[in-house]
Amino acid sequence: MKHKNFTCYFLIILFILSILFLPSKVYSMGKDGTYQKLIYLTFDDGPSEEVTDKILDILKDKNVKATFFLIGYKIDGRERIIKRIKDEGHSIGLHTFSHDYKKIYKNSESFINEIKQNENSINKVIGKSQKILRFPSGSNGHMDRSLYNELHSLGYKIFDWNICLSDGLDHNTPVNKLYAEGTAKCINPNRVFFLAHCSGNNQNTCKALPKIIDYYKSKGYKFMQITDKTPEYHFRISK
């Protein structure tokens, strides 16, 4: 009886985990008529002189594209990096202007003002508005239905993740642990939204990234960047 109860609880937990994410599309049809596994490499908290350039070098060497969710206040003085991201064919997303949790999560109005300010700061550099965004620490617990609808009315799309490195919590996470995290099994493994960070202290991320890319290539994944055409992928919306 205890074994049956444990099995039931385990299945319930799996079900709850499966509905935390709301992908509207899992597969992409290839030119040959077969379905492809997709991975979206994403990097938060840049730009930084020390790490973002290194990540761009790695992506160029591996011939893959990615998406960079940038913090607005970090752009001043690093415009060259923003232009490089764009010129090398990567996507740019919004990650608020200040990244100050007390400020951005004060209320919905504060969050939207931060996103608009972030968008304007990037627009001044590349001459194009960006409409893809990521909540600092993710949308879970920060996005209710009202905010979700308001963001949509302004043309924004929200993207969370289903694989995450711990480099945002600990810059000194060992390289082998980052690799294990980056290649772990995840919910919806045919559509991977991969989160890493590119602030100035994420040197170990640069060391782990080439092998992580090689792993997904060996598994037949197609590397994609997030655009305004990409179906949203976010955590469950708060009531």
Image (tube, rainbow, N blue to C red):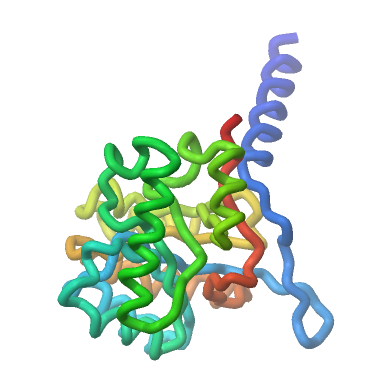
| Residue closest to the eye, 84 or 196 | 84
Question: Residue 74 lies in what quarter of the image?
Answer: bottom left
* Identity of the residue drawn at 43% across and 67% down: 93
76 displayed left or right of 124: left
Image location (x, y in percent) of residue 5: 72, 15
Placement of the C terminus among the 4 image quadrants = top right
220 displayed left or right of 151: right
* Identity of the residue drawn at 56% across and 73% down: 227
Placement of the N terminus among the 4 image quadrants = top right
| Residue closest to the eye, 223 or 70 | 70
Task: Answer yes or no: is residue 179 visible.
Answer: no
Task: Answer yes or no: is residue 223 visible.
Answer: yes
123 over 198 or under it: above or below: below
From this viewpoint, which residue is outermost toward the right? 33
Question: Residue 155 lies in what quarter of the image?
Answer: bottom right
Image location (x, y in percent) of residue 59: 39, 82
Q: How many marks?
A: 0
181 over 37 or under it: above or below: above
* Identity of the residue drawn at 39% across and 69% down: 68
From this viewpoint, which residue is outermost toward the top? 1
Image location (x, y in percent) of residue 17: 62, 37
14 over 203 or under it: above or below: above
* Identity of the residue drawn at 45% across and 46% down: 138
Image location (x, y in percent) of residue 77: 16, 76
78 displayed left or right of 175: left
| Residue closest to the eye, 109 or 163 | 109
190 over 59 or under it: above or below: above
Question: Residue 13 lies in what quarter of the image?
Answer: top right
